[in-house]
Amino acid sequence: MFKNVLVGIDLSQSGPSGPSDLGAPVQEAVRQAVVLAEKASARLTFFAAVEVPEQIRYLDLLTNEPLDLKQSLTDQANAVLARLVRDCEAKGITAAARMGYGIGWEEIIVAVLREEHDLVVVGTRDPAGIERFLFGSTAQKLLRNCPCPVWVTKPGPLPQTPRIVVASDLSSVSDLALQMAAAVAIIWNANIHLVHACDYPLDRVWIGSVNDENTKQYHAQVRGDAERALAEQIARLSGTAATITPVVIDAQRGADLAILKYLEKHSVDLLVMGTAARSGIPGMLVGNTAERLLQEVSCSMLAVKPSDFQCPVTLGNESQRRRAQGPYL
């Protein structure tokens, strides 16, 4: 399933030594992508977006030498990307470098549409507080808008045999997530826990006289239905060699918290789940489970879009916007 992988290189996360000193999140994204490429015989494309600051007119206050800022940023990005390509080629991995001009997450999606990538790998800086609420991170924007699966890496390399969890809401997109996880599990020789966080909505409804025995029967029925649904989900994934264990957990305090506790208890390395796009004010205030969990989990996340997902970025609209920004390299 992984043949044409794009790796997002965020040069704004560079260390004190400059663009060649990639920050820890970017380094981890590169490491995991390289391992994936080696195991799956995938082609890697390292992609960087150059965003020229609007305050370029103040540039002469910072330097005594005439400087074409756009060209300088382009040269620095090209040098970093070329080094990454050489490192891959030395390992026998097919690799290429691409650049775009503009906002990082938008340019990554444009590259995905143009070159039909089947996976995007990026690191995350985990913005907090008001920054997260108003703007979100590049990874969050990709989870919401990118048409192909997005692998968001967290600091710390994947072990040789990672612990993989698929969070299932029993929907069709969870089937896609399980299929994706099975491909990863086969590559890494790992097992999968297919986890459903079981909620009991009637517990929050005042019905009248309900005794403990009725409540227990209600919970048992809901759990039983969920267990059967997970078994059917596994059965639909025919022909895989991956070992999949269905798990139903209680989520009276919410699915997000239940999943987080399960991930922590079992020291999970990779969470795979489906996601759906929400736009406008509802999306900003609510988001979806994958976006919310991204900020809380300590493991990497692989998010999959539903089959009917419609990408808000199109090449037609994008080409009109880009005329003022420069060519796609």
Image: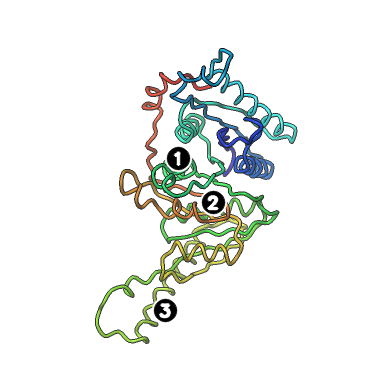
Quarter of the picture containing the N terminus is top right
Say which amino acid is labelled 1. Cys
Q: Is residue 251 above or below residue 151?
A: below
CA gap between label 2 and label 1 equals 15 Å
Around disc 3, counting alpha carbons within 10 Å, would you say few (fewer than 14), some (14 to 19), or many (20 or more)?
A: few
Around disc 2, counting alpha carbons within 10 Å, would you say few (fewer than 14), some (14 to 19), or many (20 or more)?
A: many
Task: Estimate the x, y position of residue 313 in percent, counting from the top left.
Answer: 39, 34
CA gap between label 3 and label 1 equals 39 Å
Task: Estimate the x, y position of residue 189 in percent, counting from the top left.
Answer: 67, 55
What residue is disc 1 on? 146
Q: Is residue 168 above or below residue 329?
A: below
The local secondary structure at tag 1 comes to loop
Quarter of the picture containing the C terminus is top right
What residue is disc 3 on? 220
What residue is disc 2 on? 301
Could you say which is closer to the camera, residue 313 or residue 279? Answer: 279
The local secondary structure at tag 2 comes to strand
Horizontal relation, residue 19 to residue 55: left or right: right
Mark 2 vs 3: CB contact within 8 A: no
